[in-house]
Image (cartoon, rainbow, N blue to C red):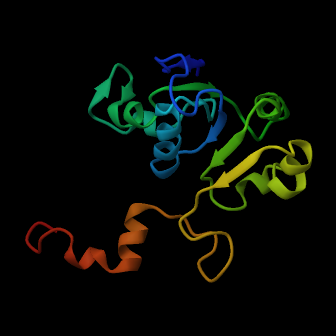
Amino acid sequence: MQAENTNTSPGFGALQGVKIVDLTRVLGGPYCTQIFADHGADVIKVEPPQGDEVRDWGPPFHGTDASYFIGLNRNKRSIGLDLTQAGGVEVLFRLLEEADVLIENLKPGTLERWGLGYQEVLQPRFPRLIHCRISGYGSTGPLGGFPGYDAIIQAMAGWFSVNGDPAAG
């Protein structure tokens, strides 16, 4: 995957000058960082080397990327990094040196498993960095660590019983 720039504005807006490193995927996290980018923040989306899986969630497509992906990642810059490898972590650290905020919605424990836990590694190394973790159920408690996808939330809330119709499913 090549780095790309979908940021069409030169940092115009209330958040001009704020730099955000975006380790989000699917819907909730990319939507959050899209709002920051729309308000002028410099958002750098970090994707795996093969690209965010949402790039393939179509049709419809615009070129080779799903419209869903484009809609959630407008006004961001993008780079592909393998954060399980030392070289990828080194590039991430260079990005974080100048960042104000790190936003991620990885399953709780993923950064820690990669040796990138906030308390152990990121906070001591980047003391001014704000870390925002988005998760469906948090990291503690009886549901801590569960993924927060739409279908899971609907099932937990009982919404499947009112979704759809009996004939079609």
Among the 4 quarters of the image, the one containing residue 156: bottom left
For the point 53% across and 66% down, which residue is it?
136
Residue nearest the viewer, comparing 31 with 158:
31
Q: Is residue 26 left or right of residue 84?
A: left
Residue extending farthest left: 167
Q: How many marks?
A: 0
For the point 20% across and 76% down, which residue is it?
162
For the point 48% across and 20% down, which residue is it?
6
Residue extending farthest right: 124
Among the 4 quarters of the image, the one containing residue 3: top right
Q: Quadrant of the N terminus?
A: top right
Which percent across, then down, holds residue 105? 59, 53
Which percent across, then down, holds residue 165? 12, 71
Residue nearest the viewer, comparing 40 with 161:
40
Q: Is residue 134 above or below residue 49?
A: below
Residue nearest the viewer, comparing 96 with 40:
40
Q: Is residue 86 above or below residue 152?
A: above
Which percent across, then down, holds residue 167? 7, 71
Q: Quadrant of the C terminus?
A: bottom left
Which percent across, then down, holds residue 87? 82, 29
Q: Is residue 47 left or right of residue 83?
A: left
Among the 4 quarters of the image, the one containing residue 95: top right
For the point 69% across and 42% down, which residue is it?
101
Residue extending farthest bottom: 142
Q: Is residue 105 left or right of residue 114?
A: left
Residue nearest the viewer, comparing 102 with 167:
102
